[in-house]
């Protein structure tokens, strides 16, 4: 069980997210329980190399994912959600559900897995959840959407799921997931009033992601974007003394809350996403153009823009947290000195996510401190 002093970042399990989590400092790891989402892209055929065009074996992919979970998060508790692949990955060997399969490997590694389900998940998924609960004795996380909570039969459906899994509310972590933040989102107070016996659940978390879908509306140079997910959570659960149970904070770090893979072959801008106290700083550059496809590419800025972004950020003591704040900040500082190559989209996303999780974990700890 954890309370409102805890942080639940939602991470799609790709290289940037894996390494950002792995590089967290121990003092911050203890304040965090991540929710990990395995993505369909993990099961796609490689586009190049010896196995180009050949779909990988699903069991092998799941075994590799379990191994990376151990490498990145060791044996600390985490939530695992396979909802994104529920309909795209078939039963393993025709008999084992992917969730049950990866849980078998996780049990061998002694991973502290808490499986995630919801009231709309199908029969095979719920059967796998029940099997994991029986083997691991770990309880479960119910991930609910505002639409499900507002539905007429919500209480009946949630009680039926508890009965099906043979669990009491005290063995269930409740996550209310808005995904994206918008001013016209359903009122959180109205949703809380519809949750049966709110104090009885093992933990209670509210997730919202306010980072924009893309940087298309950002101008070249520096942009400030309000962290509305953080500000609204803080106002609801720490500034308002009338709340009868404080929720833990959850977000999608510096990414869009609704799952969407980037367009294949796109050419994103060379940009930096950096979390501040109440805002995100987006330092947007131009998209680099390949010399092979453009005669004018030599006159346009390329990936060296990252050096410039890093230098401008590190020179501003009002913005930069310092090279010792996190591994992500250390990376940015090194690039400000032009150490090593420019980096790439993955390494800069990794640095931004690592910095963001460190900022949020410490902000929450400071709020909860006496």
Image: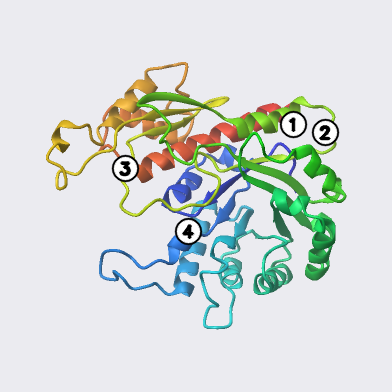
In the image, what residue occupies the spot 69% across and 70% down? 126
Front of the two marks 4 and 1 = 1
Q: CA distance from mark 4 to mark 1?
A: 36 Å
Q: Residues within 10 Å of mark 1 (few under 14, many from 20)?
A: some
In the displayed structure, would residue 284 be above or below residue 61? Answer: above
Q: Which residue is mark 4?
A: 68
Q: Residues within 10 Å of mark 2 (few under 14, many from 20)?
A: few
Q: Earlier in the sequence, mark 4 or mark 3?
A: 4
In the image, what residue occupies the spot 49% across and 59% down? 39
Q: Dot 3 lies on which element?
A: loop
**Residue 216 occupies which quadrant of the picture?**
top left
In the displayed structure, would residue 70 be above or below residue 291? Answer: below
Q: Which residue is mark 1?
A: 236
Q: Dot 4 lies on which element?
A: helix
In percent of width and height, residue 336 lies at 31, 27
Front of the two marks 3 and 1 = 1
State if disc 1 and disc 2 touch (CB < 8 Å): yes
Q: Dot 2 lies on which element?
A: loop
Q: Which residue is mark 3?
A: 344
Q: CA distance from mark 2 to mark 4?
A: 39 Å
In percent of width and height, residue 160 lies at 82, 66
Q: Earlier in the sequence, mark 3 or mark 1?
A: 1
Q: Residues within 10 Å of mark 3 (few under 14, many from 20)?
A: few
Q: Earlier in the sequence, mark 4 or mark 1?
A: 4
Q: CA distance from mark 2 to mark 3?
A: 44 Å
């Amino acid at each position: 069980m954890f309370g409102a002093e805890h942080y639940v970042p939602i991470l799609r399990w790709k290289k940037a997210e894996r390494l950002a989590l792995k590089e967290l400092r121990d003092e911050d790891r203890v304040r965090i329980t991540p929710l990990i989402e395995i993505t369909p892209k993990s099961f796609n055929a490689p586009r190049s190399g010896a196995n180009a065009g050949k779909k990988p074996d699903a069991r092998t992919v799941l075994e590799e994912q379990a191994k990376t979970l151990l490498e990145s998060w060791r044996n600390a508790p985490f939530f695992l959600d396979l909802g994104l692949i529920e309909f795209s990955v078939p039963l393993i060997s025709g008999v084992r559900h992917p969730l049950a399969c990866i849980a078998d490997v996780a049990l061998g590694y002694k991973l502290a897995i808490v499986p995630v389900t919801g009231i709309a998940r199908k029969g095979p998924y719920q059967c796998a959840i029940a099997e994991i609960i029986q083997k691991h004795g770990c309880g479960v996380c119910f991930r609910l959407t505002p639409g499900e909570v507002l539905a007429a039969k919500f209480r009946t459906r949630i009680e039926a799921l508890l009965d099906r899994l043979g669990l009491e509310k005290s063995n269930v972590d409740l996550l209310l997931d808005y995904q994206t933040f918008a001013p016209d989102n359903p009122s959180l107070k109205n949703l809380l009033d519809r949750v049966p016996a709110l104090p009885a659940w093992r933990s209670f978390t509210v997730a919202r992601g306010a980072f924009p879908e893309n940087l298309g509306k950002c101008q070249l140079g520096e942009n400030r974007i309000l962290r509305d997910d953080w500000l609204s959570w803080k106002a609801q659960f720490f500034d308002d003394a009338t709340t009868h149970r404080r929720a833990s904070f959850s977000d999608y770090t510096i990414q869009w809350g609704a799952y969407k893979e980037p367009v294949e072959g796109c050419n994103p801008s060379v940009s930096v996403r950096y979390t501040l106290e109440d805002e995100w700083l987006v330092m947007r550059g131009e998209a680099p153009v390949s010399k092979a496809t453009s005669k004018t590419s030599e006159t346009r800025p390329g990936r060296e823009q990252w050096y410039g972004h890093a230098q401008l950020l590190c020179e501003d003591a009002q913005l930069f947290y310092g090279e010792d704040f996190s591994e992500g900040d250390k990376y940015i500082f090194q690039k400000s000195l032009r150490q090593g190559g420019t980096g790439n989209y993955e390494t800069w996303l990794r640095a931004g996510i690592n910095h963001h999780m460190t900022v949020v974990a410490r902000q929450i700890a400071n709020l909860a401190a006496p």
